[in-house]
Amino acid sequence: MGGSIAAIGAGLAVIGAGLGIGQIGGKAMEGIARQPEAAGDIRTSMIIAAALIEGAALFAVVVALLGL
C-alpha cells in the first residue's frame, strides 16, 4: 500500500512540474511577442525559473519515493 501511495505522490509532483514549466514557457512567449527587445532577459528568467521548478519536482519525487 505504501509503495502505491508513494508512486501517486511522485506522479503528482511530475505532473505539477510539467504544468508549471508549461505555464512559464507560454507566458514567456507572450512576453517576447509583446516586447521582442526584451527577449534575452525574458529567456534568462524563464530558464532560471524552469530550473527551480525542476529542482523542486526532483526533491518531491525523492521524498515521495524514500518515504516508503
Image (cartoon, grey):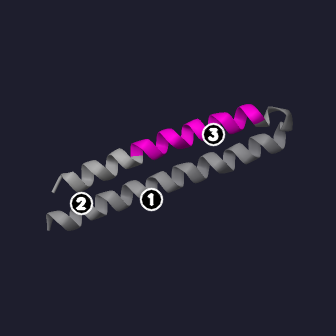
Q: How far apart are marks 1 and 2 (CA)?
A: 14 Å
Q: Residue at x 61, y 40 (%)?
A: 47
Q: Look at label 3 and name its amino acid.
A: Met
> Few, some or many C-alpha atoms within 10 Å of disc 1 (few <14, some 14-19, many ≥20)?
few
Disc 3: which residue: 46
Q: How far apart are marks 2 and 3 (CA)?
A: 30 Å
Q: Give the range drawn in magenta.
A: 40-56
As helix, strand or loop, the secondary structure at mark 1 comes to helix
**40 vs 26, nearest the viewer:** 40
Q: Which mark is residue 6?
A: 2
Q: Look at label 1 and name its amino acid.
A: Ile
Q: Residue at x 53, y 49 (%)?
A: 20
As helix, strand or loop, the secondary structure at mark 3 comes to helix
Q: Where's residue 26, x and y in %? A: 67, 50
Q: Earlier in the sequence, mark 2 or mark 3?
A: 2
Q: Residue at x 33, y 48 (%)?
A: 60
Q: Look at label 2 and name its amino acid.
A: Ala
As helix, strand or loop, the secondary structure at mark 2 comes to helix
> Pointers 3 and 1 in contact (CB under 8 A)?
no
Q: In this view, does 52 lie to the left or right of 29?
A: left
